[in-house]
Image (cartoon, rainbow, N blue to C red):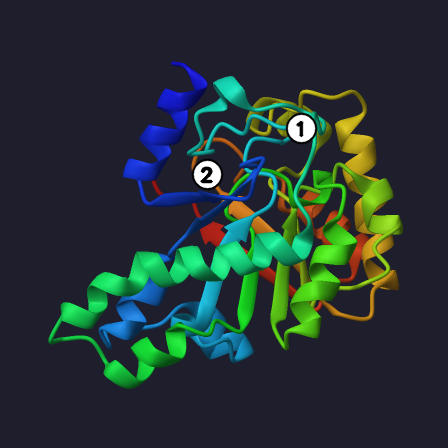
Amino acid sequence: MSKSEKFKRLEKMGYRFVGKHAHTAVKTCLWTKKSILDEGTCYKQKFYGIKSHRCLQMSPSIFFCQQRCLFCWRDLKHTRTEWDGDYDEPADIIDECINAQRSLLCGFFGNEKANKKKLLEAQEPNNAAISLAGEPLLYPMINEMIKEFHKRKFTTFLVTNGINYKALENLSEEPTQLYISLDAPSEEIHKKICRPQTENAWEHLNRSLELLPSFNCRRVLRITAVHGKNMTNPRDYASLIKKAQPDFVEVKAYMYL
């Protein structure tokens, strides 16, 4: 599959690429759509007060990640493990992400079932879920991006695989909520299920877990539970959780989409 075919395929799936260098993507979350139709909301609304209809799901590093997780929905052929090439400025990315979200939602204006108040509010998103795909901490200007979101009165939910611990150390602008994915209780299982493409990934993840208590923002560990793969060794999970001292642990079941 060529790169242009890759873009077309993802666009058919609802992704929109923004920026001159097209390393950023937006995709309207299912729960954003459901909320506009008054058909339910994301758990983040119930737990953390994030309005589902005003959430912007995006990633500034759609084709960059150090892992090839078994449960990842991405086509991994074009994924690179470190940043390669030029990149767009945070302010430009955010402007274009908001415009892309508006474009993706425009069809709801013709839907009689849409909650018009929510739909109008959705034109001005106020939470950035920096978690769509790829590893956000590989984007060279992630600090500046979070700062720019906050300047615009957004809350920010940042999800990382924890391998780039140096980027965490240098994260001077903390997100509103920081997630580290913890999808294995041991190095052996981590290698099998997360399939890291860089050396010392388990060690680096543990460095990130050790860093987590130093953050002042809300801190969360996210576990994607896959039957027969990583739902084992609860004592080892407990040890890692104790090390990280998160405010919350979110366990979600893997679902094939």
Task: Confirm whether residue 137 shows in the render.
Answer: yes
State the mark number for residue 170: none
The mark nearer the N terminus, 1 or 2, is 1
In the structure shown, which secondary structural element does the residue marked by tag 1 occupy?
loop
Q: Which residue is mark 1?
A: 66
Q: Could you tell me the amino acid type at mark 2?
A: Val
Q: Could you tell me the amino acid type at mark 1?
A: Gln
Q: Which residue is mark 2?
A: 226
- Compared to residue 34, the image places residue 19 above or below, namely above
Left or right placement of residue 42 versus residue 127 in this view: left
Percent of width and height locating residue 217: 76, 70
Percent of width and height locating residue 206: 81, 41
In the structure shown, which secondary structural element does the residue marked by tag 2 occupy?
loop
Percent of width and height locating residue 232: 56, 38
Task: Confirm whether residue 257 shows in the render.
Answer: no
Say which of 98 and 239 sits in front: 98
- Compared to residue 173, the image places residue 226 above or below, namely above
The residue lying at 62 percent from left, 31 percent from top is 64
